Amino acid sequence: MGAVKRVLVTGGAGFIGVHTVRLLVADGFTVLVVDDLRHACGEPLPPNVDLTAADLNSSAAAGAVAHFRPDAILHLAAQGGVSRSVRDPAGDALVNVLGTVAFLKASADVGCRRFVFASSGGAIYGRAARLPTSERTTPRPLSPYGAAKLAAEGYLGVFARTFKLRTLALRYSNVYGPFQDGTGEAGVVAITCERLLSGRAPVIRGDGQQTRDFVFVADVADANLRALRSRVSGAMNIGTGVASSVRTVVDELVAAATYHGSVDFVEAPPGEVRDTALDTRRAAKLLEWRAPTQLRDGLRQTFTSFRERARHATAPASAAPAGTEARPGRGSPAGSG
């Protein structure tokens, strides 16, 4: 496989996508973003990045692949949320399975040799017997979301064996950081930031002692770049290897906000994993990657970013810089990761 120069990023207008696209452009890549903009984070893409607004399963998306002819595809676009997948498993599969298959086919059709897929390290493994969990662990997802990610990985294997695509599934742990959507039902860090900044009490689903492997978005973007440049195939965990309780994360954000009120607890939703942490030794060995951002530092950076965006959103229109407009909120209590 020759040097990767042209990268198509699905979901590139979203939270992880914008961080990754900016890093790719800064590193000299030519980038095309394909995104249906339903989960756009509201931050501008670099001015030299073209955007095709299209559904993953549409002819417009396939046409964008055919016209751009990428050297590699980074497939970030997804329906993200365990609870939503439980309510609508068919809709979840439409995006997370069929959308992935559509892009694998489009990749093969134009001779694109590299395909990196954003999978899930927490939802795929289920109730793992050992933490941190390695890629050798047999996947046992508890939610339709995890099942869809695992099914998509199966298709990656098919296209690797049959069409000679060099595929890699990056099994992310719980990604957090600036620009994440805090108005949905997934992402406890973003949702807690939104609630604190609007004067509402943080909400924890469950008892708060459930643990997650929280990894900072800038570290994930770096992993994405390294994966695109590499020849590594199969599956690879991307996380910190550290299990942190949801209560610890909420307490850190409460301290950052100097909030003195109560924290509310609601019943945990079905299908969520109790404890997760990922063994990242494979990424360290094959990508020379690690997640250097400490949780406390990442949480403080994230809260500061949310506070600045909130200030810009409430400033007079003439004073607000481009790309900081507030998006309408959908509103929901905080999730557990």
Image (spheres, rainbow, N blue to C red):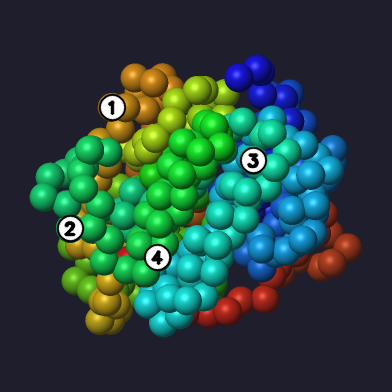
Query: Count the marks: how many?
Result: 4
Q: Quadrant of residue 25?
A: top right
Where is 324 relative to 105, above or below?
Answer: below
The numbered mark, 3 or 4, whose residue comes first in the sequence reads 3
Residues at marks 3 and 4, CA–CA distance in whole angstroms: 25 Å
Instruction: Name which residue type carries label 1.
Output: Arg
Which residue in the protein does label 2 denote? 127
Which residue in the protein does label 3 denote? 108
Residue at the image point whose x is 30% and y is 47% from the top: 213
Camera-side mark, 2 or 3: 3
- Label 1: element kind: helix
Instruction: Name which residue type carries label 2.
Output: Arg
Which residue in the protein does label 1 denote? 281
Residue at the image point whose x is 73% and y is 31% from the top: 6
Which residue in the protein does label 4 denote? 145
Residue at the image point whose x is 79% and y is 44% from the top: 66
In percent of width and height, residue 313 lies at 71, 66
In percent of width and height, residue 128 lies at 17, 52
